[in-house]
């Protein structure tokens, strides 16, 4: 495989890398016993600053199925972060004890920041409402296994497109595959953020925005439902008003294609009623299992990489200020300036527009 050394966003991936990873995943599915000791003696560091069930457990299960050990936390209370230790220092320590780091945090750009200070590969397991690239690996594996190919399809993304980090990463990954178009279904308040729509335009991705799920269902090959992300709302009344805006019921599937896939990163919170679970088109529980299997393929690659010391990064290079309160730069003031590869006026951690400070 090639030079992919971290997975903090989908832009770290290439099509060739994905193809090789998926091939390995299929071999793991076919011959799991062959891989049982393939990471014996290696250690995964699992740092979850935000709640998780599937992502955390599937990484732990993946590591253990490869014979690796795991240490970490699923709640920062009890770590030095609660004493005020910087992310950079925590990462330097955990990198020195382990062979790969998985990090989830409510702060956008935290995995990008972590990778600056880690001599072992860093994997972003979700950074606030920004990105979630290993959920995308999970989603791609599900589509490839259940549909036979990725491409030549219309994908409906429904729900909280503003805060849903899984869909932000998924649309970017779809640029690797031919003839994929999107129905973006959300209330106006929960549309994709500007940086995602800008990127879709730059990439020439075809999409149509709408508010009504039922109208869109007949045209879809994949319906990807998402949860309204209560924890990311600043306005509780707005959350209460929008939380039940979409509920997919079995009845609504009467008009769907017979081979449409119904996906969801889970957890759900009422947006798919339980009578859909037994429809053969519903693959969200399979999706969760594919997540563990593709993470096995990823860890197998990353845990064997040689350590790579990171160059010195000085905070004096910080000449621009990101105004996004959810960005890691709002708390970790020592971080160097990084520019988004989307545009020079966007923050390289969270991709939001920055106010340039005159020095
Ligand atoms: C998602 C997440 O954490 O972003 N869950 C997951 O990782 N499988 C989706 C969500 O929380 O709604």
Image: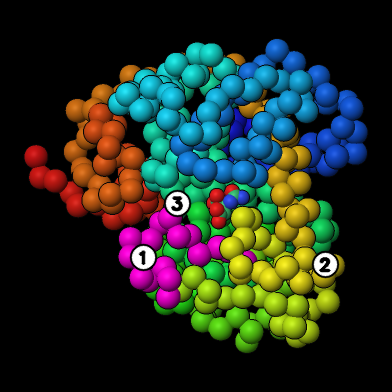
The tag earlier along the polypeptide, 1 or 3, is: 3
Viewer-closest of 225 and 205: 225
Give the quadrant of residue 358.
Answer: top left
Residue 155 visible here: no
User: Mark 2 or 1, which is nearer the eye?
Assistant: 1
Q: Is mark 1 within 8 Å of ligand 1?
A: no
Q: Pointer 3: residues within 10 angstroms few (<14), some, or many (20+)?
A: many
In the rendered image, residue 70, in percent from the top left (x then y), is placed at 63, 22
Lateral position of residue 30 relative to residue 149, left or right: right
| 133 shown above or below 95 | below
Name the mark nearer the viewer: 1 or 3.
1
Q: Residue visible at 71% across and 20% down?
A: 68
Q: Is residue 219 magenta?
A: no
92 or 312: nearer the eye?
Answer: 92
- In the rendered structure, find residue 130 and report the number of the disc placed on it: 3
According to the picture, the residue beneath numbered tag 2 turns out to be: 278
Count the numbered circles shown: 3
**Ligand 1 has an atom within 8 Å of the beta carbon of the residue at disc 2:** no
What residue is rendered at 24% in x and 33% in y?
Answer: 333
Q: CA distance from mark 3 to mark 2?
A: 32 Å
Q: Secondary structure at mark 2?
A: loop
At mark 3, the secondary structure is: loop
Say left or right for 318 vs 249.
left
Disc number for residue 236: 1
Please name the residue shown 42% across and 30% down the image.
77
Distance between mark 2 and mark 1 Cα atoms: 34 Å
Name which of mark 2 and mark 1 comes first in the sequence.
1
Q: Position of residue 348 (x, y in %)?
A: 35, 44
Q: Residues within 10 Å of mark 1 (few under 14, many from 20)?
A: few
Give the magenta part as a residue range.
Answer: 225-241
Q: State which tag comes first along the sequence, 3 or 2.
A: 3
Identify which residue, 143 or 233, lies in the foreground: 233
């Amino acid at each position: 495989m090639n030079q992919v050394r971290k997975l903090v966003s989908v832009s770290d991936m290439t099509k060739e890398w994905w193809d090789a990873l998926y091939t390995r995943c299929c071999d793991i599915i076919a011959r799991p016993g062959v891989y049982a000791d393939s990471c014996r003696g290696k250690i995964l560091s699992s740092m979850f600053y935000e709640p998780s069930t599937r992502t955390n457990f599937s990484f732990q299960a993946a590591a253990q199925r490869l014979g690796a050990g795991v240490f970490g936390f699923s709640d920062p209370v009890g770590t030095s972060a609660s004493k005020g230790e910087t992310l950079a220092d925590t990462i330097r320590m955990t990198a020195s004890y382990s062979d790969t780091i998985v990090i989830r945090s409510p702060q956008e750009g935290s995995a990008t920041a972590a990778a600056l200070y880690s001599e072992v590969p860093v994997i972003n397991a979700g950074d606030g409402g920004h990105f979630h690239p290993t959920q995308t690996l999970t989603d791609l594996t599900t589509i490839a296994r259940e549909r036979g190919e990725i491409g030549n399809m219309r994908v409906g993304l429904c729900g909280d497109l503003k805060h849903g980090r899984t869909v932000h990463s998924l649309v970017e990954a779809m640029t690797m595959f031919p003839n994929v178009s999107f129905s973006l279904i959300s209330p106006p308040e929960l549309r994709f953020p500007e940086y995602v729509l800008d990127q879709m335009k730059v990439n020439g991705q075809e999409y149509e925005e709408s508010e009504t799920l039922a109208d869109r269902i007949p045209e879809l090959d994949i319906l990807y439902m998402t949860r309204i992300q209560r924890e990311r709302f600043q306005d509780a009344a707005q959350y209460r008003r929008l939380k039940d805006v979409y509920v997919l019921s079995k009845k609504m599937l009467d008009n769907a294609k017979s081979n449409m896939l119904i996906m969801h990163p889970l957890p759900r919170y009422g947006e798919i009623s339980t009578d859909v679970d037994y429809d053969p088109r519903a693959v969200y529980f399979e999706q969760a299992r594919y997540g563990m299997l593709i993470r096995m393929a990823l860890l197998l690659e990353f845990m064997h990489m040689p350590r790579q010391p990171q160059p010195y990064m000085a905070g004096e290079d910080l000449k621009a200020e990101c105004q996004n309160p959810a960005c890691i730069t709002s708390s970790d003031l020592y971080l160097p300036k990084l520019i988004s590869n989307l545009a020079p006026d966007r923050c390289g951690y969270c991709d939001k527009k920055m106010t340039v400070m005159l020095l």
